[in-house]
Image (cartoon, helix red, strand yellow):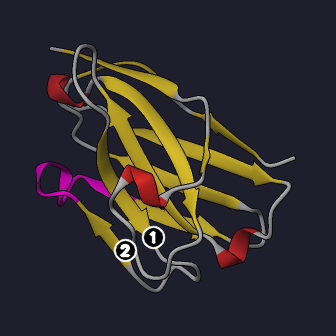
Amino acid sequence: QVQLVESGGGLVQAGDSLRLSCAASGLTFSVYSMGWFRQASGKEREFVSGISRRGAGTYVIDSVKGRFTIYRDNAKNTVYLQMNSLKPEDTAVYYCAASGALGIPTLSGQYIYWGQGTQVTVSS
């Protein structure tokens, strides 16, 4: 059974940092592209960042560029999202997801496995 388990969320102040982790099990991690999505209250889920199977390619959306970094450790079956200089507008539930598509998928429909999410709250 495939499981993606996120951790590392919490309540922080603006300007602080958090590192989210997503531990995968039940799948051959290295053959999946991985992504991080977020969903703020009352808003649709949005793609935040993605990384290719071996980690050679990464992508982040403009609103987090320069602040968020995605990376993975295939030996540990884990993908990370380092979030620096957090802003109140980053407040959301963050989800990791796995995709069998090549490259760095950005659409939620391209992802087949999802974690349950971790809450990130940034106070001003």
Q: Give the image location of residue 94, x and y in percent.
A: 43, 34
Could you tell me if residue 17 is visible in this image?
A: no
Residue at 87% across / 46% down in the picture?
1
In the displayed structure image, the side of residue 84 where residue 23 appears, left or right:
right
Crowd around label 2: few <14 · some 14–19 · many ≥20 (10 Å) = some
Q: Give the image location of residue 47, x and y in percent.
A: 31, 49
Asked whether 119 falls inside the magenta stretch, the response is no
The residue under label 2 is which amino acid type? Answer: Thr
Considering only order in the chain, which callout, 1 or 2, is on the residue closer to the N terminus?
1
Question: Is disc 2 placed on a helix, strand or loop?
Answer: strand
Q: Give the image location of residue 116, x and y in percent.
A: 60, 29
* 48 to 120, vertically: above or below: below
In what quadrant of the picture does the C terminus appear?
top left
What range of the chain is rendered magenta? 61-69
Quarter holding residue 59: bottom left
Residue at 17% across / 59% down in the picture?
65
Question: Is disc 1 placed on a helix, strand or loop?
Answer: strand
Tag 1 residue: 51
> Which of these two is toward me, 124 or 31?
31
Residue at 33% across / 62% down in the picture?
106
Q: Give the image location of residue 68, x and y in percent.
A: 30, 53
The residue under label 1 is which amino acid type? Answer: Ile
Tag 2 residue: 58
User: Label 2 to label 1, Cα distance in Å?
Assistant: 4 Å
* 104 to 6, vertically: above or below: below
Q: CB of mark 2 within 8 Å of CB of mark 1?
A: yes
